[in-house]
């Protein structure tokens, strides 16, 4: 099938590369010419495990090309995916400017029947919005359909998630239209659900808001665990064995960040308000999340006071492991707090350091985790990269000015840290009374 994908961010690039790998002819479009240039040379513009190899293989086999010429790509395609950004406005509402720009450009290029697929996360009603834009801007009176096909991939495992999604949701105006998308996804042999456009759009928001709720729920429990002497890791494990609950998204820590959960939860709140539904639950989910970093920072400050002149080592900058994405990354909030207090911050992250340095020029970068610990008055764990779990902690201790670790992701065992003589502050692990 001839496929065009508009937007080569985390979603568009991975979608395009995987469709090409399944044997389709794919043209990926981005208005950022530097991205097009890099991708055309086979150089990924984002860090995503397995992406580089798949990208280069499909360029070599002529199944994928990159361009800034949206009109040319649209003319060639039978199916056009819109995978542009939908960032939040200051009131939480999704900004649909990129979707609008893409839809209008598609309309002007429309020369025969095509299916236009919204893969971006968009509020309910955007299918109709895109439909109206195309009708208003098309130059030839040709027919078309708009489908909603929300994306559920996770950064850090985007290729695997796209090859093996838990489900593929297709919101289409008719079964006949849905069939084309079914055909495109058929080689993946995964569960597919056909529904109406509005329900598909809501499935995406409801799913992300539910996962965000799980995270805020366990974080609220974690705070209580600290007071009553329970260990939130044990509590989450015990809860997770229950099939009705499940173990996923029950990791207490610094809260949810990244480019999706915060913005999608706020957008759903905005939709609720627009339709006169209050949605207190989601307000609370967001409020709990917003307290995570200040609470963590207050603990650091209380222990190290005054922060002025202190050197802090930081492990992890990306909003989660296996990605270089820094959008809504907790590291940035914590760094700002520490710098404002007069501390120096020396950080290490396997892939997100150049992006962080561009955002925070005062940030010092370390070559590796040990270099971040060297001379530090405290080490702060922000992203749970696997390599941090396997550090030689005796060496870490010997390098530090004072062996104090603030672990925002609970990657170490308090007992082991105690045995090593490292003062360890983690999340939701209350001090238990020993009955030995
Ligand atoms: P992104 O910001 O990384 O990428 C968007 C890309 O679109 C950019 O490269 C931009 O230059 C390009 N673009 C914007 N307008 C354009 C236009 N008119 N023509 C051509 N190119 C244009 O975004 P992303 O993280 O890939 O997310 C895309 C959408 O998918 C968002 O709605 C997001 O909420 C949703 N989503 C993201 C993820 C994720 O993990 N990142 C997961 C599921 C869904």
Image (cartoon, rainbow, N blue to C red):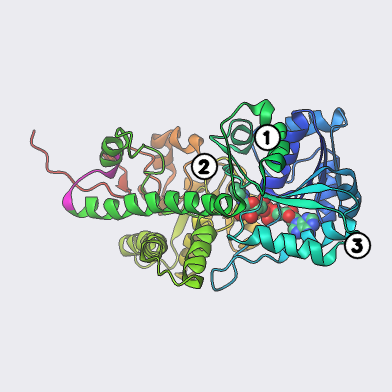
Left or right: 145 as drawn, with respect to 339: right
Q: CA distance from mark 1 to mark 3?
A: 29 Å
Q: Badge 3, how many Cα within 10 Å: few under 14, some, many 20+?
A: few
Q: Where is residue 62? Give x, y as percent.
A: 88, 31
What residue is rendered at 79% in x and 40% in y? 43
Quarter where residue 390 is shown: top left
User: In the rendering, which numbered label is found on residue 369?
Assistant: 2
What residue is rendered at 28% in x and 40% in y? 414
Q: Is mark 3 within 8 Å of ligand 1?
A: no
Q: Which residue is mark 3?
A: 139
Q: Tell whether position 320 is magenta.
A: no
Q: Where is residue 246? Give x, y as percent.
A: 36, 37
Q: CA distance from mark 3 to mark 2?
A: 58 Å
User: In the rendering, which numbered label is found on residue 182?
Assistant: 1
Contact (Cβ within 8 Å) of mark 1 with mark 3 = no
Secondary element under disc 2, as helix, strand or loop, is: helix
Q: Which residues are magenta?
A: 228-233
Q: Earlier in the sequence, mark 3 or mark 2?
A: 3
Secondary element under disc 3, as helix, strand or loop, is: loop
Quadrant (top left/top right/bottom left/bottom right) for the N terminus: top right
Q: Earlier in the sequence, mark 1 or mark 2?
A: 1
Residue 352 visible (yes or no)? no
Outermost residue, left side: 435
Q: Tell whether position 230 is magenta.
A: yes
Residue 215 visible (yes or no)? yes
């Amino acid at each position: 099938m001839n496929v065009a994908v508009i937007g080569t961010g985390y979603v568009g690039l991975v979608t395009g590369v995987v469709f090409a790998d399944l044997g389709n002819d794919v043209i990926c479009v981005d208005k950022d010419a530097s991205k097009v240039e890099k991708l055309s040379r086979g150089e990924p513009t984002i860090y995503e495990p397995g992406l580089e190899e798949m990208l280069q293989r499909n360029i070599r086999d002529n199944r994928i090309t990159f361009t800034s010429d949206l009109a040319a790509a649209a003319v060639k395609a039978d199916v056009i995916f819109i995978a542009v950004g939908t960032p939040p406005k200051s009131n939480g509402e999704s900004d649909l400017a990129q979707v609008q720009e893409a839809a209008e450009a598609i309309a002007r290029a429309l020369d025969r029947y095509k299916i236009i697929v919204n893969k971006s996360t968009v509020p309910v009603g955007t299918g109709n919005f895109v439909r109206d834009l195309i009708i208003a801007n098309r130059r030839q009176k040709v027919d078309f359909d708009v489908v909603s096909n929300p994306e559920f991939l996770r950064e850090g495992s985007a290729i695997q998630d796209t090859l093996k999604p838990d489900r593929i949701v297709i919101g289409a105006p008719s079964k006949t239209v849905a069939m084309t998308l079914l055909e495109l996804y058929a080689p993946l042999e995964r569960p597919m659900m056909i529904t109406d456009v509005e329900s598909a759009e809501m499935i995406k928001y409801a799913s992300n808001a539910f996962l965000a709720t799980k995270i805020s729920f366990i974080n609220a429990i974690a705070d209580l665990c600290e007071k009553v002497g329970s260990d939130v890791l044990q509590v989450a494990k015990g809860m997770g064995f229950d099939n009705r609950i499940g173990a996923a998204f029950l990791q207490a820590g610094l809260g949810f960040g990244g480019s999706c959960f915060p913005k999608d939860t706020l957008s759903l709140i905005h939709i609720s308000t627009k339709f006169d539904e209050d949605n207190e639950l989601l307000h609370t989910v967001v409020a709990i999340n917003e307290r995570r970093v200040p609470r963590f920072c207050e603990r650091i400050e209380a222990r190290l006071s005054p922060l002025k002149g202190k050197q802090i080592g930081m492990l992890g900058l990306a909003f989660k492991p296996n990605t270089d994405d820094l959008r809504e990354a907790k590291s940035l909030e914590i760094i700002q707090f520490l710098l404002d207090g007069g501390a120096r911050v020396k950080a290490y992250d396997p892939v997100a350091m150049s992006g962080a340095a561009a955002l925070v020029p005062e940030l010092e970068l370390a070559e590796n985790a040990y270099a971040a610990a060297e001379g530090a008055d405290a080490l702060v764990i922000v992203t749970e990269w696997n390599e941090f779990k396997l550090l030689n902690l005796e060496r870490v201790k010997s390098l530090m000015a004072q062996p104090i670790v603030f672990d925002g992701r609970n990657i170490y065992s308090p007992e082991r840290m105690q045995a090593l003589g490292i003062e360890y502050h983690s999340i939701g692990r209350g001090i238990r009374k020993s009955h030995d």
